[in-house]
Image (tube, rainbow, N blue to C red):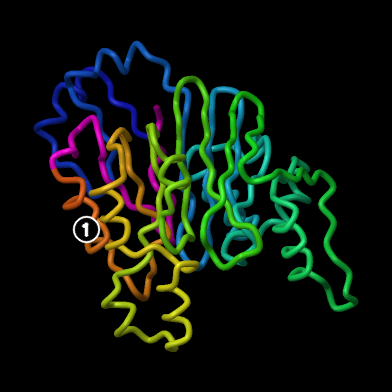
Amino acid sequence: MLALGPASAIAFARTKVSLNQIVTPASTAVKVMLTRMSVCLSVLASGSRGNCAIVRSSQTQILVDAGISCRETFKRMRAAGEDPRAISAILITHEHSDHVCGLAMLAKRLNVPIFMTGATHQAWTRAMRDANGERPHLAKLEVFLSGSRFQIGDITVTPFTIPHDAADPVGFTFRAEGIKLGFVTDLGYLPPNVCDHLCGCDVLVIESNHDVEMLRGGPYPWSVKQRVMSRVGHLSNDALADFFAKDYDGEAAYVVLAHLSEQNNHPELARGAAEEALGSRRSLLRNRVLLAAQSQPLEAIQL
């Protein structure tokens, strides 16, 4: 995790900034040093081969999705400076394998509450039946309803329905210690209710899955291309840019582009579309664009 001391804060303007480096402007260095950084986001993996992230307050640590193996989750947590033993709960957005493939083992190893909707749980257990037809059992299952907020430690979680081809897919907002984080991927478009939930976020994690032309000319079968481009598929760079230009309130300090397709997108295409749409609202204090990756954790964001 990056923390700037007085000397480095004053000198940062003379330093070359790397692609995803998180920096603090010199003008606010003193304020940052005097304010305890207590809310943190770590995206451990993001993409069609697995999704997993950590939302942490000073008292609570939540794992959002379990789309990589237990071993890899723990490895990436440690690389990001997080302690797997401190996980308070696991939240699941939907039952697709790139969001749940590590869930059974993580639940067994961690013995913490697992939160998902009832329909998502049913779909997951059907998909995970063994050779004898036995369904997996979660000892500490907690079922929530989309639209009904609940509490995990000192973090208030608000799930909301998103348009995707799953049983009951949701996005989340998290509130703790005066900070709001928005987390939404795997959706075909951004309906008004989703836009409303994303207002006032300090950090926004949002899908920028594909470049439309790369997808159309790419290697996927036409049926898969139709699914990805549908209103229950995945959000394109252009669709996200349209949201930034027309419906986004521009209040986030950080915007994290997530679930980028390795086959049908390129990081610089996604970044370029987002930054052009954000335009003059980008600054050192607002709308810094970061890219979550499939193969390595994103440097932790602390607020």
Determine whether 21 is above or below 105 in the image: above
Give the percent coordinates (x, y) of residue 1: 39, 35
Q: Residue at x 38, y 14 (%)?
A: 35
Magenta segment = 280-303
Can residue 292 be found in the magenta stretch?
A: yes
Q: Residue at x 33, y 27 (%)?
A: 3
Outermost residue to the front: 192
Is 18 on the left or on the right of 118, as rendered? left
Label 1 sits on a secondary structure element that is helix
The residue pinned by badge 1 equals: 273
Residue 193 visible, this orientation:
yes
Give the percent coordinates (x, y) of residue 11: 14, 26
Is 144 on the left or on the right of 252, as rendered? right
- The three-letter code of the residue at mark 1 reads Ala
Give the percent coordinates (x, y) of residue 108: 78, 51
The answer to which image quadrant residue 122 occupies is: bottom right
Determine whether 202 is above or below 77 in the image: above
Determine whether 239 is above or below 109 in the image: below
Which image quarter is the C terminus in?
Answer: top left
